[in-house]
């Protein structure tokens, strides 16, 4: 049995208590925390993500897995230097729900999926103004700005971010990804976004492709 099996099983079985216990055991055993996250927790999260995509798991299960994942990660990384954490980072993402939109379950799922794929995620929460998004992006030096709109009436707020970045001469600095129930590929193309996320699990894949393209990989 893999030394990361308990961590993986804890997530795939939606067991928060087991995830915490397994994380503490891993720390006590001197296992590499970053390997525990990638080989154990993230592997378990991938199982849940696949089930979600296949219609075999639903939002409540995904949220339980997310809670277990985040609890275990906090334990594993408590003593890891930031410099070491940076070596495994796939990139920095600023995540939010647009101004006027109070929905955040989908965004929260995206946050967990991104974290499980080694992205450093800052979640600004819901109903966030475009100017706040850009100010935080500059402050935190993120790579990706990802905004969700769950109502057709709030979709124009996604365009505001792109336009405000252009006005400030910052558009080329950030990858802008957008999603949400009413959002489409055509909408994202029309507003000049870098990508359209049609599901939570598609977001890290799209982000990695966009970052690789920017780096010329």
Image (cartoon, rainbow, N blue to C red):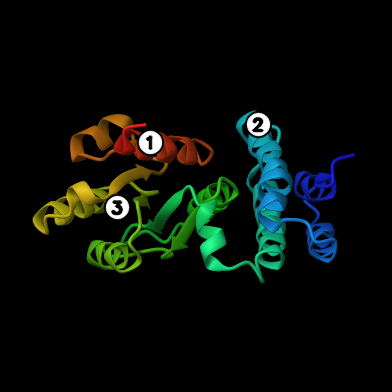
Measuring from the top left, give residue 4's x and y in whole percent.
80, 47
Q: Secondary structure at mark 2?
A: loop
Residue drawn at point x = 70 percent, y = 37 percent: 47
Q: Residues within 10 Å of mark 3 (few under 14, many from 20)?
A: some
Residue drawn at point x = 78 percent, y = 56 percent: 31
Q: Residues within 10 Å of mark 2 (few under 14, many from 20)?
A: few
Asked if the residue under mark 1 is in contact with the one under mark 2, i.e. CB atoms within 8 Å, the reply is no
Q: Secondary structure at mark 1?
A: helix
Measuring from the top left, give residue 8's x and y in whole percent.
77, 45
- Of labels 2 and 1, earlier in sequence is 2
Q: Give the foreground label among 3 and 1.
A: 1
The answer to whether 106 appears left or right of 73 in the picture is left
Q: Which mark is residue 212?
A: 1
Measure the C-alpha gap from mark 3 to mark 2: 28 Å
Q: Which mark is residue 154?
A: 3
* Image quarter (top left, top right, bottom left or bottom right) of the C terminus: top left
- The single residue placed furthest to the right in the displayed view is 1
Q: Give the foreground label among 2 and 1.
A: 1
**Which residue in the structure is indicated by mark 2?**
55
């Amino acid at each position: 049995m893999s030394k990361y099996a308990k961590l993986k099983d804890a997530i795939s079985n939606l067991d928060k208590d087991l995830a915490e216990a397994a994380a503490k055991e891993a720390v006590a055993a001197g296992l590499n925390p970053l390997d525990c996250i990638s080989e154990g927790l993230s592997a378990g999260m991938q199982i849940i993500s696949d089930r979600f995509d296949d219609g075999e798991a639903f939002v409540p299960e995904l949220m339980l897995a997310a809670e277990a994942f985040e609890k275990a990660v906090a334990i594993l990384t408590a003593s890891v230097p930031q410099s070491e954490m940076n070596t495994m980072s796939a990139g920095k993402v600023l995540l939010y729900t647009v101004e006027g939109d109070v929905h955040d379950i989908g965004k929260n799922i995206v946050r967990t999926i991104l974290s499980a794929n080694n992205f450093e995620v800052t979640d600004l929460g819901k109903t966030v103004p475009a100017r706040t998004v850009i100010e935080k992006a500059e402050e935190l030096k993120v790579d990706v700005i990802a905004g969700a709109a769950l109502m057709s009436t709030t979709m124009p707020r996604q365009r505001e971010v792109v336009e405000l970045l252009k006005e400030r001469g910052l558009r080329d600095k950030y990858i802008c990804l957008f999603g949400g129930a009413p959002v489409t590929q055509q909408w994202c193309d029309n507003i000049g976004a870098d990508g359209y996320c049609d599901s939570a699990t598609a977001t890290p894949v799209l982000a990695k492709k966009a970052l690789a393209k920017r780096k010329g990989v």
